[in-house]
Amino acid sequence: MARAGILYSDVVRAAEQIRQSGEMPTVDRVRIILGNTGSKSTIAPMLKQWKEEHTEEMATSDSGLPQSVVNAIRGVYELIKTEAENTIKETQIHCEQQLSSKDSQLITQSDQIAALEAAKQLLQKQVTEQLKNNQMLDQQLHQSKLKASSAESDNQGMKNRLADNEKQLDALHHQLHSARTQFEHFQEASAEQRNDDRRLFEAKISRLENELRHIHTLNATNQTEAAQLKTEIHHLESTQAKMKEIAQVQLNELSNLDTSYTKTLFKLEEANRMNSELSIQLHAAQQSLQEAKIQLAVSLQAHESMSKQLALLQEKDANDEREKLYLLASILQNQESRSTTTDKIDDSTTPPPQAPQQTIQAR
């Protein structure tokens, strides 16, 4: 915040006083002339304005060179400055073109990410629909269980009528044993397939763990119910001692139930396979999304690197410009010193009658 009482006219008087004493006006010197009052942040812009208004006088007093030499230096300076500005503008245009290209790439990558998000939502929708299908299959399986329970009730009512079928019981027992063996083999294959599907789901898609647990619970329930069904069949074997005509009818009904249960398990396996394919597609979409994010980060890093390079180029051009001006001023000062030394040598070696000519030459 500027202090009250420090005016531009005060800074001008102090600067003129310092310049007339042969020194370079600076903020500290002006502040001393003003009696150590006023902040540097207040004096600095005023002193800068005064220097800009007295650029020619400051250049002449600082360098000790004639005005023509100062003008020549200023012309060279303006030429170098113009070339440097042109170079900076060309560099900026080139960098802006590259930045525009990068921005276009970022827009394209953003569109790709949006497309991947849409594909991801579509896959999630398909998974939801598949879960609904699984629920429908569960309902069908429940209906099959009800049919099996009804068949068991019918079997219980037929126990008293199965007295004279001992011979046919052996054949029926053999058929039931073969059917049980096939059923157990199919059950083991189904359990192994479900375990493989479960490991695949757990390794690739964590978001479907709850659904998989639900499916596994259903499978365990199916196994339990299948075990109960086998128990009931065993019970049927022990109690059906005297089945004859009605046993064949009951066997056909049991075969139909087994076929229905097999179809239900096949549908469940088909649903598990479709879930596996959907999980693979979802994993691929997630990988594509991750790659797009990496490419976006690389593009942003390249954008930042190019901005830093542009700043370094501008700083380098400014340093080169200052070095050129310093070298040019040194060369002109050396030439002026050599010219002055030559004039002095000529004054000491030239005869007295030629003094007027020497004076003209020195001029």
Image (cartoon, rainbow, N blue to C red):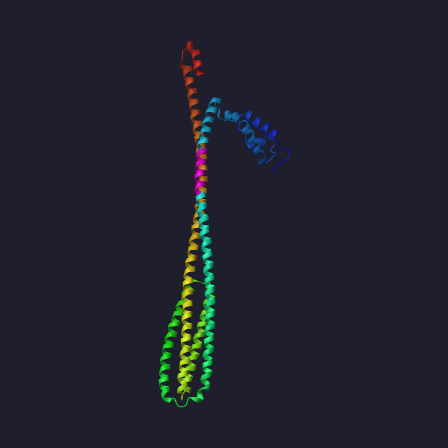
Give the tally of numbered discs: 0
Which SS does the magenta portion mostly show?
helix
Horizontal arrangement in the rendering, residue 19 relative to residue 155 (left or right): right
For the point 42% across and 55% down, the residue is 288
Q: Residue furthest bottom?
A: 164
Tell me, yes or no, if residue 294 can be seen here: yes
| Residue 315 drawn at (x, y percent) | 46, 37
| Residue 148 drawn at (x, y percent) | 45, 79
Tell me, yes or no, if residue 66 can be seen here: no
230 falls in the magenta region: no
Q: Residue furthest right?
A: 4
State which region is magenta.
Answer: 85-98
Would you place residue 272 above or below residue 170 in this image? above
97 falls in the magenta region: yes
In the picture, the quarter occupied by the N terminus is top right
For the point 47% across and 66% down, the residue is 131
Q: Quadrant of residue 96?
A: top left
| Residue 195 drawn at (x, y percent) | 40, 69
Of residue 341 and residue 116, the one placed in the foreground of this image is 116
| Residue 74 drawn at (x, y percent) | 47, 26
Of residue 96 and residue 125, the one placed in the foreground of this image is 125
Would you place residue 321 above or below residue 142 in this image? above
In the picture, the quarter occupied by the C terminus is top left
Of residue 269 and residue 322, the one placed in the foreground of this image is 269
Would you place residue 31 above or below residue 241 in this image? above
Q: Residue furthest top?
A: 353
For the point 45% across and 53% down, the residue is 113
For the point 46% across and 31% down, the residue is 82
